[in-house]
Image (cartoon, coloured by chain):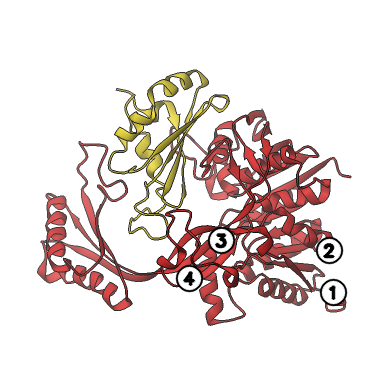
Chain colours: A yellow, B red
């Protein structure tokens, strides 16, 4: 089963307790498949236990990209989290583990 | 009026490389160099340093940065804009002027203040994150409003070679020179939005040029040890072409620019800055030639009424301890150590966390069920009200040497005070901007 890693790249950013995950297709022709399969529900299921709040998805077809904004995803927020990766910078590679 | 300006991104955070901006200023044919040096928490920590020493509170590496940059900035006639003033822009500007005098380089340095709104802060105001009043969080140590590009314009109009600020929205550091040189009005929303897109692309410096992008075999980036920092050629309408100095490491492509354009953007249709509400949803990126990407299509709407304020507060102390296990059954022994520590530390801390580094520390679980690490490291972290209580965590981990599972080694322990950050809003009318000038030439008149 191919993973998102095979089709797309991702960078994680943070604002407070919100993690922002881009998902960018390497090839424009793969964008429709990402838009179809990588739904809010699919991401919520994949990141269960990590993304604990609302997830919003933005579609940016001219960039062949989706943007996921995941609330309550950083163990309380960057500045007061006890997590080793308080910014959730490595979450990009958790998203790319998703099978498609 | 100029038809094109070249802006360089010379730092993405306070800890960034110091040699790359020197190279960019030397060979980049820049008009302006911008150093973005303030992460969310940097200014609160700087405020604590200033309380201990009234002459401190700016970028701890100011001397190194400025000594290495001053000669090339003067020789190439590049103006510098930076938020490295942190909690003390005037102190930073005076320090830069002193360094310039010592190096016999005549410069005029402007300090922009007004972002520090601690005295005007309403502790009953709700935090944007929770709706709870700010007073519920903990003793407040800093409150800084995100100033916009307009706050920097008087300093640029004064003719200063170097403009030092405290908290300013990162893209505004880049928008200010464009407004100044091109005379863009504060309600020229589309041009401001295009300038904001450029500023957002440049503000993390190396992240636009393949830094934080590389993944060997998948996303290859050449010569990252000498990663080049980016510049943008921006025309009078805010359309831009991104580039980097020929011969430097890294790569600048549509892919690297797309990652950076979307980085930390919580709404691509409405990216809020003090200058404008920028819509990046129609932005196009096209590769004109190697390491050269054109940016078009940002649109703007009216700027937010109020300014965002970043509030720092004392959030207690975090105690940490670590110990490593290797070989057969390493994970089981680390889990036994976890169980022992849970019993020992039970009931003593409001918040306690166990991580297995090498297995589940980053994501709480492994997405690869077949992975068996040869070695694993147990990490324990807890929040406490005092330094002494927090220290118990590391002490208990260390005591596993003679009381815990077989083969534990390499313990480390630490206690750090934690400064939390929450946000609130403030009326623009409650923020007043001041500019002071500091002459780096001993013979010049003070203004």
Checking the image for residue B140, the label placed there is: 4
Q: Are marks 3 and 1 in contact (CB under 8 Å)?
A: no
Q: Chain letter of disc 3?
A: B
Cα distance, mark 3 to mark 2? 27 Å
Query: Residue at 83% across / 47% down in the picture?
Result: B183
Mark 1 lies on a secondary structure that is loop
Please name which of the two marks, 4 or 2, marks the residue nearer to the observer.
4
Check the image and report above or below for B225 versus B314.
above
Residue B402: percent from left, percent from top: 12, 71
**Are discs 2 and 1 located on one and the same chain?**
yes
Query: Residue at 66% across / 64% down in the picture?
Result: B430
Residue sitting nearer the eye, B98 or B421: B421
Residue B74 left/right relative to A96: right
Examine the rendering and report whether any part of residue B144 can be seen. Answer: yes
**Are discs 3 and 2 located on one and the same chain?**
yes
Q: Residue furthest front?
A: B124
The residue that disc 1 covers is B447
């Amino acid at each position: 089963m191919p993973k998102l890693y095979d089709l797309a790249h991702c960078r994680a950013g943070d604002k407070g307790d919100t993690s922002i995950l881009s998902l960018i297709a390497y090839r424009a022709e793969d964008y429709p498949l990402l838009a179809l399969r990588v739904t809010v529900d699919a991401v919520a299921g994949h990141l269960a236990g990590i993304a604990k709040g609302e997830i919003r998805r933005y579609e940016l077809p001219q960039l062949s990209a989706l943007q996921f904004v995941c609330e309550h995803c950083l163990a309380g927020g960057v500045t007061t989290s006890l997590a080793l990766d308080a910014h959730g910078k490595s979450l990009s590679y958790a998203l790319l583990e998703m099978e498609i | 009026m100029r038809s094109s300006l070249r802006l360089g991104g010379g730092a993405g955070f306070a800890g960034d490389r110091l040699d790359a901006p020197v190279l960019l200023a030397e060979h980049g044919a820049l008009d302006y160099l911008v150093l973005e040096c303030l992460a969310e928490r940097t200014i609160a920590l700087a405020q604590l340093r200033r309380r201990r020493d009234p002459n401190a509170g700016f970028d701890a590496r100011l001397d190194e940065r400025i000594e290495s940059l001053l000669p090339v900035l003067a020789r190439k006639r590049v103006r510098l804009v930076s938020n490295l003033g942190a909690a003390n822009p005037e102190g930073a500007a005076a320090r830069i002027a002193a360094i310039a005098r010592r190096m016999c380089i005549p410069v005029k340095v402007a300090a922009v203040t007004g972002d520090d709104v601690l005295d005007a802060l309403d502790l009953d105001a709700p935090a944007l994150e929770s709706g709870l009043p700010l007073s519920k969080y903990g003793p407040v140590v800093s409150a800084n409003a995100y100033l916009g590009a307009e706050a920097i314009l008087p300093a640029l109009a004064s003719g200063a070679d170097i403009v030092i600020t405290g908290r300013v929205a990162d893209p505004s550091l880049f928008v200010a020179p464009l407004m100044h040189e091109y005379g863009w009005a504060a309600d020229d929303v589309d041009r401001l939005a295009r300038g904001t897109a450029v500023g957002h692309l440049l503000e993390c410096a190396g992240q636009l040029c393949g830094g934080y992008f590389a993944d060997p075999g998948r996303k290859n980036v050449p010569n990252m040890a000498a990663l080049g920092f980016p510049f943008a050629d921006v025309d009078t309408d805010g359309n831009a072409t991104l580039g980097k100095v020929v011969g430097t490491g890294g790569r600048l492509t549509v892919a690297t620019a797309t990652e950076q354009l979307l980085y930390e953007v919580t709404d691509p249709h409405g990216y809020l800055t003090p200058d404008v509400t920028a819509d990046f949803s129609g932005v196009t990126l096209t590769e004109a030639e190697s390491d050269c990407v054109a940016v078009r299509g940002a649109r703007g709407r009216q700027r937010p009424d109020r300014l965002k304020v970043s509030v720092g507060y004392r959030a207690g102390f975090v105690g940490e301890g670590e110990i490593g296990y290797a070989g057969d059954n390493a994970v089981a022994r680390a889990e036994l150590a976890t169980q022992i520590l849970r019993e020992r530390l039970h009931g003593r801390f409001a918040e306690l966390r166990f991580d297995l580094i090498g297995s589940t520390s980053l994501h709480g679980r492994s997405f690869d069920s077949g992975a068996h690490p040869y070695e694993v490291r147990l990490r324990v972290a807890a929040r406490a009200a005092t330094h002494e209580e927090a220290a118990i965590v590391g002490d208990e981990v260390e005591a596993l040497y003679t009381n815990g599972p077989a083969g534990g080694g390499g313990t480390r322990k630490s206690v750090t005070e934690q400064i939390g950050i929450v946000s609130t809003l403030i009326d623009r009318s409650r923020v007043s901007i001041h500019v002071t000038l500091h002459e780096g030439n001993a013979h010049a008149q003070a203004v």
